[in-house]
Image (spheres, rainbow, N blue to C red):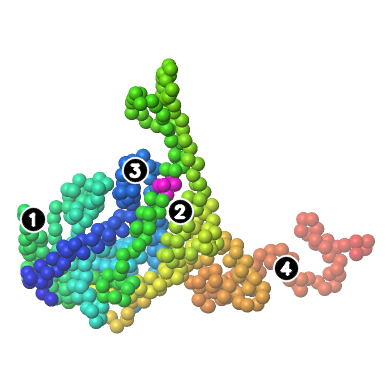
Amino acid sequence: MDIRDFDVAKKLIDEIETEQFQDRRRAEYKSYKVAEGGQRDYILERLQELFPKSWSAMRVSDISVSNKILSKISKAYKDSPIRDYGEQTDSLAEMLDDADFDSTMSEFDRDFNRQRYGLLWVNKIDEKPMFHSIKGFVGFVKRNEQSGKIEAVVLNYPDTEITHNANSNADGIEQNLSENQDDSSAEVKKFAMWTKDFHAVWKMSRNNKTASISREVIEGNENGINPLGILPFVYRSKSSSTDLPFLNQLTQQSITYNVLNSDLLTSSALQGFGQLVITMPEDMVLETMHSGMTTAMTLPIIQGADTQADAKYINPNPDLAGMKETVNNYAADILSEHGIQAQGISGGNQNFSSGLERLIANADVSDQITGNQRVYTKVEQEVIDILEAYQLVRKQSEKLTVVFPKAKLMISDNETLANIKMRLDMGLITKVEALQMIDPNLDDKKAEDKLADIEKENQSRLDKFTMGDSSNADSIGQDKLRAGFNGEVKESSPLQS
């Protein structure tokens, strides 16, 4: 595939510009924004659809369940892994540290869990590696239908058609300084393309709804050659299909949760304030007024009138506890669907007295984190292959070995420690195994050495409370010796003996 050819490039660009791809990009951008702090725009949008006349008076809930779940699951790089690359181990570690590789991989981990696929760009600038986790609304891949390997990558930063919605506060203009992400690439449309053989950049401009495509010359690479011979990207998907996985429903679930919670918050306020209802005769006109805790009004009495003006508050007295349970049950269903099972949760008898935070905090997601770490081990090996192509590391026969630290149990977890003690007392485990349950990163040798150190320290403490070895004392009249108050040895009297 020669991406320098106009017809080839136009075909790829036309696909990206189709409504199907545009809808997917909007959904991907929405997913990213909901998880990263921009959820409120979409909650307001949904409330406006449901309550077109009263949405502005509602209490808006903005708790990103998406962010909470992703933060819980995306901990594969909470602790940096141990990497072994033979003689180049130290130099590789220094290079990756300078490039903040682990931070980028933490971002990749989050994108991978949110999108269910990830694209990592390995670049070289000023003879140093640079790593970027490409978002789903920016990167596009073409995969081989048989092998699944990526054959082409296209990067295009979205314009305002993708990033804006009715409640966005962006101005649609791309400034020189860092600003609102909704304005990224607001006025330009460039498509950077790679295959293993070629690299080209195409620009699309519109004039009176007519689009024209032209190729930009890359300074220093006028022929559009990819000198690496491989794609500088690593792609991974949670689906075995060569197409993209289905969109993560977590985004819409997070929005729906907040719409329900907004109903609850607004109902709580209405129950506290009540709804003001005014009854008036036909010929009476009341000026527009605002209802609130301090509302006051004057209602005249009309002499001889059968109907008098009246005002009163109506309190609907809703079942707030039942509403809260409905919202919490829905939140538990969301967590369960994304692999988070909280302790003490069964059926509809959830106890949310400590809130959503504790529900997530008590969940066990170690299986998901471990599964992702197996994927990232292969990702890092492909990164090394690209760094070799950049000649930033030397090619060698040894492969990269990546060992992720296992999660440590908290010593303060009394239940876990009691469980270990019970197993020791029953003779079901050895002391070495007990130490390894507390710290899974200890191998048998390290655990044995630690036990020896513990025993030595305990013996040292015991020696401080003894008088030392009595074999050196004179055996004759030994029972007639006693220690004085000042530490000197005195002979006992016959009465004392």
Label 4, label 1: how many angstroms apart (C-alpha)? 98 Å
Residue 183: x, y in percent? 21, 51
- Visible in this render: residue 212? yes
Q: Residues within 10 Å of mark 1 (few under 14, many from 20)?
A: few
Which comes sooner in the sequence, label 4 or label 3?
3
Q: Which span is picked out in magenta?
A: 261-265
Which comes sooner in the sequence, label 4 or label 1?
1
* Residue at (38, 25) in percent of width and height: 281
Q: Residues within 10 Å of mark 4 (few under 14, many from 20)?
A: few
Q: Are marks 4 and 3 in contact (CB under 8 Å)?
A: no
Quadrant for the C terminus in the image:
bottom right
- Visible in this render: residue 388? no
* Residue at (31, 44) in percent of width and height: 52
The amino acid marked with disc number 3 is Trp
Label 2, label 3: how many angstroms apart (C-alpha)? 19 Å
Q: Are marks 4 and 1 in contact (CB under 8 Å)?
A: no
At mark 4, the secondary structure is loop
Residue 334 versus residue 240: which sits nearer the camera? Answer: 334
Residue 359 versus residue 438: which sits nearer the camera? Answer: 359
**According to the image, label 1 marks what residue?**
209
Instruction: Give residue 327's mark.
Output: 2
Instruction: Give residue 468's mark.
Output: 4
